[in-house]
Image (tube, grey):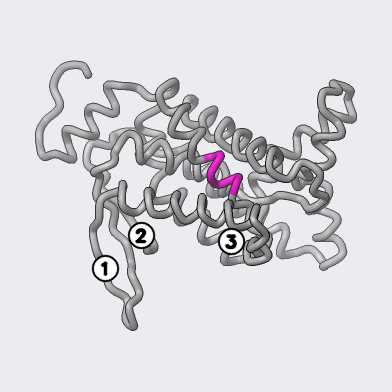
């Protein structure tokens, strides 16, 4: 199932931060496309989050160590392929605007970065000595998806399903996002058990960690009134009073 849109009734805030995050990822990806292969590899190793470097540096607080820690955040704006980039941005476009409305602009940005940090910690916990750079926005976007599932589990999401031909359906978020999470969890377990050569370099535990973090952190960042407004609008009723 490929999500292509959702129910935006009740959303009032213009999702400036979500747009800026997408534009930031786009800018970095375009820059990556301009690099020769050797330069691109150097760029990825310089700004991707390498678990072995992070674990060997922690808990140092020197100037040099700060640049290593910063890769947790710079890696969130890098992607390994066009499919990787487009897939991540599609999910961010569909789910991020509602969460920004539910949290406010500043709260959403802090939540997004905290989700990405949590995803990196989860990935490092399961592969602390890896020398392979972790790149991609999927950990932070997983946090957005976890928040969406907790706030709007019955919200309708438009999805494309290919059964010989493309078909369009509207299904509850709990089905789309719940199934996605189960698949990530099963793939992560398979990777731990050695079937993970099938993992193909995908950081499944970053996805799982980001999703769980988002489902927890949302309660600290949400604006109850904004959430109530969206829920009432989606249910066809006007929102009155406070939640």
Residue position marked by numbered label 1 in the rendering: 168
Residue position marked by numbered label 3 in the rendering: 84
Give the mark nearest the N terminus, 2 or 3. Answer: 2
Disc 3 and disc 1: Cα gap in Å?
23 Å
Labels 2 and 1 touching (C-beta < 8 A): yes
Query: In the picture shown, does residue 60 fall above or below 130?
Result: above
Query: In the picture shown, does residue 74 fall above or below 65?
Result: below
At x 66%, y 43%, the residue is 123
Query: In the picture shown, does residue 10 fall above or below 32?
Result: above
Query: Magenta span covers which residues?
Result: 205-210
At x 32%, y 81%, the residue is 165
Position of residue 201 in the picture relative to residue 177 (left or right): right
Q: Residue furthest bottom?
A: 164
Q: Position of residue 130 (x, y in %)?
A: 79, 48
Determine the secondary structure under disc 2: strand
Give the mark nearest the N terminus, 3 or 1. Answer: 3
Position of residue 61 in the picture relative to residue 102 (left or right): right
Position of residue 237 in the picture relative to residue 36 (left or right): left
Determine the secondary structure under disc 1: strand
Q: For residue 80, say whether it is visible.
A: no
Q: How packed is label 3: few (under 14 Cα within 10 Å), some, or many (20 or more)?
A: some
């Amino acid at each position: 199932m490929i999500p292509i849109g959702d129910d935006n009734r009740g959303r009032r805030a213009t999702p400036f931060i979500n747009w800026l995050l997408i534009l930031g990822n786009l800018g970095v990806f375009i820059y990556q496309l301009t690099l020769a292969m050797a330069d691109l590899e150097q760029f990825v190793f310089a700004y991707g989050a390498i678990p072995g470097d992070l674990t060997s540096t922690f808990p140092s607080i020197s100037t040099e160590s700060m640049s290593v820690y910063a890769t947790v955040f710079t890696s969130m704006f890098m992607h390994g392929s066009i499919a990787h980039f487009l897939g991540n941005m599609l999910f961010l476009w569909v789910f991020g605007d509602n969460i920004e409305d539910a949290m406010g602009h500043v709260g959403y940005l802090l939540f997004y970065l905290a989700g990405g940090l949590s995803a990196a910690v989860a990935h490092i916990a399961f592969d602390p000595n890896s020398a392979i750079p972790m790149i991609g926005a999927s950990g932070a976007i997983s946090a957005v998806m976890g928040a969406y599932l907790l706030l709007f589990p019955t919200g309708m999401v438009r999805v494309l399903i290919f059964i010989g031909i493309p078909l369009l359906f509207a299904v509850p978020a709990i089905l789309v996002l719940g199934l996605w999470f189960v698949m990530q969890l099963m793939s992560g377990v398979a990777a731990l058990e050695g079937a993970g050569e099938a993992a193909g370099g995908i950081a499944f535990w970053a996805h799982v960690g980001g999703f769980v973090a988002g489902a927890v952190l949302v309660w600290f960042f949400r604006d109850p009134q904004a959430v109530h407004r969206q829920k009432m609008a989606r249910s066809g009723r006007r929102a009155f009073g406070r939640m």
